[in-house]
Amino acid sequence: MAKATIKSRTGATITIEGSEKEVSNILSVFERTEAVAQVKKTISKKTAAAKDQKKRMAASDLVVELKEEGFFEKPKGLGQISKSLEEKGYLYPITTLSGVVLGLVQKKMLRRKKLDGKWVYGK
């Protein structure tokens, strides 16, 4: 009678007893299962990395990036901010940007003032 001992990924020790053919079959099934699990783990890591790279930047991050580039040296309106983001390939309606920019004002990352009856934003 053949005998084999296997240690699983979880640390469990498994002892198999049976004919040589039975033990061989069980070992081959176990090895295939382990190989498939390893391949799935590798694919999962690659997929997660790809998703991280494709993640879209938040609108607030994009507006802060504009500030860092000196975009707000002169006060800008929401339309100008939207147009600048659009030129970079990011499409945000003014209705979305109003809340984003207001949040940055509240965090004191931007300032706003009324100019000719319209709110403008700057440093």
Image (tube, rainbow, N blue to C red):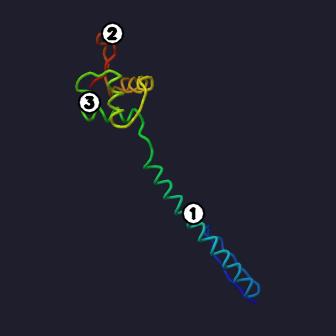
Q: Is residue 44 above or below residue 25?
A: above
Q: x and y percent of residue 38 in the render?
A: 56, 67
Q: Position of residue 19 (x, y in %)?
A: 76, 87
The location of residue 112, given as percent across then percent down, is: 32, 19
Q: Residue at x 26, y 21 (%)?
A: 75
- Taking the image as shown, residue 76 lies to the left or right of residue 50, namely left
**In the rendered image, the vertical position of residue 8 relative to residue 46, given as above or below:** below
Give the quarter of the image for residue 17.
bottom right
* Disc 2 packing (10 Å; few <14; some 14–19; many ≥20): few
Residue shown at 46% from the left, 53% from the top:
50
Tell me the residue that label 3 is attached to.
Answer: 71
Q: Nearer the viewer, residue 54 or 86?
A: 86
Using the numbered discs, state the Cα–Cα distance from disc 2 to disc 3 in whole angstroms. Answer: 22 Å
Q: Does residue 58 sit above or below 14 in this rendering?
A: above
44 sits to left or right of 21: left
Quick one: label 1 or label 3, which is nearer the N terminus? 1
**Residue position for label 1:** 40
**Position of residue 41 measured from the top left corner of the image (x, y, whole percent):** 55, 62
Element assignment for label 2: loop
Most extreme residue toward the bottom is 1
Amino acid bearing label 3:
Phe
Residue at x 28% of width, y 23% of height: 122
